Image (cartoon, helix red, strand yellow):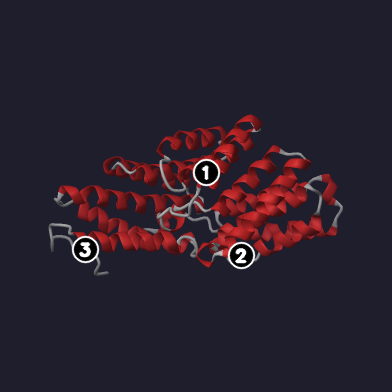
Amino acid sequence: MNRVPASGSRAALDHDLLDQIAGEVRGLAASYLTSSPLALVTPVWRLRREVFELLERRQHPHLTAPLYSLAGRLCALIAHASADLGDPVAAETNTRTAWLCAELADDDSLRAFIRWVQSNVAYWSGDFPAAARIAHSGRRHATKGSNLLRLASAEARAWAACGDTREVERAVGVARAARERDTGEDQQAGVFRFEPGKAAYYASEAWLALGGENNARLAAREATEALSLLQAIPEQRSPELVAAARLDLCNAHLALSDLDAAAGELRQVLSLPVDNRTEPIVGRVRTAASTLEMPRFTRSDLSRQLLDEIALFRAYPARRDLSDVLS
């Protein structure tokens, strides 16, 4: 690759090179919405290495901070991919490096994104109180764009998993207000922007976790809205995001004992290619399986068929040890 000079060929970073790297980071962030995390790990890692090679040299002071910001975003993308691929150790390592870069760049948007990744790692590891606390702590950095919507949505989902209705309602209220204030002017690229469609399925998960028929109906409404929003704009039509919304709708239908409707949504997800079967997707499928094993469904032939299909799906996840991929 020619975008960054080989080590020792040029000591200084100029504006043109900085703009070129920034463009590539934006491109990778956009690609995260349409490509599998595994497909992006290697190109992100390579660019990250090149950026850190530049930082090891003496650069003009006014270019150093934006370069650290770009380095932090690349580390954050690796951390996000690591979490999606079920490697929490790699995710934690890269969030620490990303945080150091954010501090050196004084980049609040990056800090907010990192806290979201850390909250997700805790959530999918089953530490729901930590997930809620981390997301809440990140709110102080959510000064612009869709960052507040991102963190409040994550916090609501985590408090719901804790069964704390009062905190869920507070966080959902913050998220709703952030959505209403969204002017569509967030210039963050790709996965660094938190779209309303994603916020809707986070809300769906929160209502589902609280339980009860009324909450299940709210969850179904939010998941349906999420699907509509995510499918309306091609560049946001991430296979994983659409699958997550479908699974939330499936789980809402199951909570309302509508097995046929749930099967329709679930089977669309079970055809996902292996590389798109991320940890959050597998986790939602696991939730559906747990519900299908409940007494009210166990006598159904359809339920048994779905459990067999789920077992096959779960046998081939996208889970990877990032040390193997990047070695």
Q: Total marks drawn?
A: 3
The residue depicted at 70 percent of the width and 59 percent of the height is 266
For the residues marked 3 and 2, what is the alpha-carbon distance in whole angstroms? 40 Å
Q: Position of residue 29 (x, y in %)?
A: 41, 59
Q: Position of residue 195 (x, y in %)?
A: 52, 53
For disc 3, the neighbor class at 10 Å (few under 14, some 14 to 19, many from 20) is few
Horizontal side of residue 291 vs 168, given as left or right: right
Tag 1: residue type?
Answer: Ala
Q: CA distance from mark 2 to mark 1?
A: 32 Å
Q: Quadrant of the C terminus?
A: bottom left
Q: Which mark is residue 178?
A: 1
188 horizontally vs 119: left or right: left
**Upstream in sequence: badge 2 or badge 1:** 1
Residue position marked by numbered label 2 in the rendering: 272
Evaluate whether residue 121 shows in this view. Answer: no
Circle 1 SS class: helix
Q: Nearer the viewer, mark 3 or mark 2?
A: 3
**3 or 2: tag closer to the N-terminus:** 3
- Quadrant into which the N terminus falls: bottom left
